[in-house]
Amino acid sequence: MSDIHETHLGCVQQSYRCTTGGWSYNPPMGKKVYIGNLGPDADRGSVEALFSMFGTVEDAYIVTDRQTGQSKGFGFVMMGSDTEAQAAIQSLNGKQCGEYTVIVNEAKSQG
């Protein structure tokens, strides 16, 4: 079961989509944004709500520890457009969110 989970996680992170005939590449339509230094109480809903002030949030996720399920303190948000992503980055980077000062910037590719 964990092999399936890991495969699909890689699929999502690399913008690949599972099809019956194999894997196909789906380039993201918007811009992927990194958010770091999240508080331990941050969840997907709170991140989506925060970023939705700047435009369409196509997807959001917080990276968690595989064994404990606890947040690792960072995540990613896929915004609807480059303009929306830049507005979020400029407005949120270095700002106080709860007790934490978040880091928000353009996500770097893994390759």
Image (cartoon, helix red, strand yellow):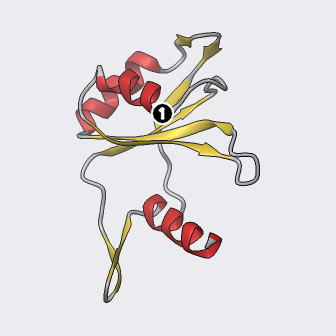
Residue 80: x and y in percent read 24, 40
- Residue at 68% in and 39% down: 72
- Residue at 52% in and 66% down: 10
Q: Looking at numbered disc 1 in the image, what kind of residue is underneath it?
A: Asn
Which residue extends farthest right? 67
Up/down of 76 relative to 3, above or below: above
Left or right, 58 with respect to 38, comes to left
- Res 25 quadrant in image: bottom left
Up/down of 59 relative to 29, above or below: above
- Res 84 quadrant in image: top left
Residue 85: x and y in percent read 32, 33
- Residue at 61% in and 16% down: 101
* Closer-to-camera residue (91/62): 62
Residue 97: x and y in percent read 54, 13
Left or right, 87 with respect to 99, comes to left
Q: Residues within 10 Å of mark 1 (few under 14, many from 20)?
A: some
Residue hosting label 1: 105
